[in-house]
Image (cartoon, helix red, strand yellow):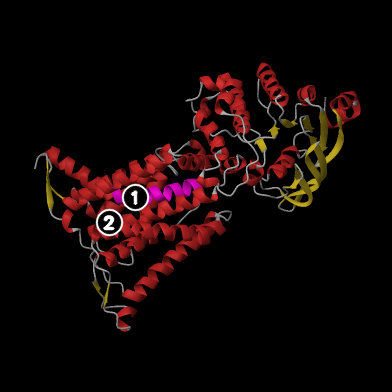
Amino acid sequence: MTLLDVDGIDGYYGESHIIQDVSMTVDEGEITALLGRNGAGKTSTLRCISGATPPEVRDGTIRFDGTDITNQPPEDIAVRGISLVPEERRVFTDLTVAENLHLAETVRNKSNTWNRGLEFKDEGMSTDEIYEFFPRLDERREQKAGTLSGGEQQMLAIARALHQSTDLLMLDEPYEGLAPQIIEAVENAIERISENGTTVLLVEQNAVAAMKIADRCYVLDRGEVVFEGAADELRANDEIRDRYLGV
Amino acid sequence: MSLLSQILTILLNGLQQGAIYVLLAVGLSIILGTLKFVNFAHGALYLLGAYLGLFITTEVQLTNGMLPEWGITTFGLGLGFLAALLIVPLVTFVVGIVMERFVAKPFYDRPDTDQILVTFGLAVIFQEALRALIGGDSQSLPQPAWASGPIALPIIGNFPRWRLGVIVITALLVLFVYALVEYTDFGLIVRAGTMDSEMVRLLGIRLDRPYLVVFGIGAALAGIAGVVGGPLANVNPNIGTEQLVPAFLTVVIGGVGKIEGAVLAGLLLGTLQVLLIQTGFAAWNRVGIYVLAAVILLVRPQGLLGSEVDVE
């Protein structure tokens, strides 16, 4: 079943037309990868989906679980069950690990005054489940997030996203700047998250690593989709790999 | 008077002088740090606080301005100082909320210069409207009877009771705001919002309401500063603009968005001013705080307790 349906969107930064008629679908339970070189429009596409502005979507629609979420505010989209692990992690460096996670948890607290009026889809993972899933974070609960290593910050960013009510986890370049053995640990975490039933949309420049765990792939080039198909098809398509991914 | 008692007197007077800066700067700093909004109308909130305090506390005889021309020669409720201390923060909190909605919000995404122009313009309109209505005469806001006269302190000797009161009230308010920011969900959201507001929203947290409250708290603190600072000097339409620049200086020296920074910087500026006044350099006291500010900012552009990131 289609969970996310991006239908012919055009995204603009001011007057620059950077996303051109992009269509893609993400099926429930699968890992979908959005690949492409630096500047291909991957991050902008994720920003369009998550409601972050800019870019502004001027044409086309984005549907999540059947509901039109195009150009809605990011907080409204997030509580519907879409969570984003952004490029460069963006953990709150001056807050502790526990505070970073608690922040994501306040969202699920329906009685929280600050969120009255938002519609919550369902519950995310509990704090205990999170720490069980990422034992390393458990050890560093009281440590400031800014003092964590790159890999640990990535884990925290993923944990924070899972702590929200998430049906669709979107990861933007989760392997960026990480050592090979850490990449493997993150890969492993994404696969376990997927096995637990969360749908994953993975944006990566590192196409080889992404194809390893993805079910379906999209390749973007200069804001347009130039390939869509199963990961196996992409692995077999030398021309696309060579031309747009450089692998 | 022994040297020790002289030093302690200067420190205590510095604390009192700095306390007003701290009250103004804490509000200004959390508004600037969280909402990235440059509020040049913050001084007008101080002015509003002082005049509200005056009119709630006593009945004032008016001789200049349009009100006496219209036949209103006495104005005020005469409810006493305590009433002013309770009512003013409530009123200025509401004024702050209205300001956030109708003045600040439409300008969040506009350049700082636009924010400065609109808020400074508003402040001038308020100040001049006030002057037109009640004239530019200085009025005195009487000290509360229960805090008048001197109090005998160990080592220092006699110290004005109200000055000590200002220090105590400021300390309590700062502790309250600090606790709110450090130990509540509201504070967690505000702190995270100061670091990366878009990420907070991407987590599914609606920031409008916390922002509204932040603005309200900042305005309420400025209002209280006007009431408690009122009896220490004359109340006239210029006091808002006079306090604005030192308050901004305090924010920048302390580090934008840092409550501890605002406290430290406020006390530093206050103490320096008092030191210059009491050692025969009274004429240089304003110059002194700017020199100190310049030196600190040259050495630490992010302010005393500001993080490196804030400079960007």
- Residue ID for mark 1: B23
Q: Position of residue B195 (x, y in %)?
A: 52, 40
- Assign a secondary structure to mark 1: helix
- Assign a secondary structure to mark 2: helix
Kindly check if marks 2 and 1 are in contact, taking CB atoms under 8 A apart as contact. yes
The mark tally for this picture is 2
Q: Amino acid at mark 1?
A: Leu
Note whether residue B276 is visible.
no
- Residue ID for mark 2: B229
Horizontal arrangement in the rendering, residue B83 relative to residue A109 (left or right) = left
State the quadrant of the N terminus of chain A.
top right
Q: Position of residue A197 (x, y in %)?
A: 72, 28
Note whether residue A49 is visible.
yes
Magenta region, residue range: B19-34
Q: Amino acid at mark 2?
A: Gly
Note whether B128 is above or below B195 in the view shown: below
State the quadrant of the C terminus of chain A.
top right
Q: Position of residue A232 (x, y in %)?
A: 87, 24
Label 2, residues with CA under 10 Å away: few <14, some 14-19, many ≥20: many
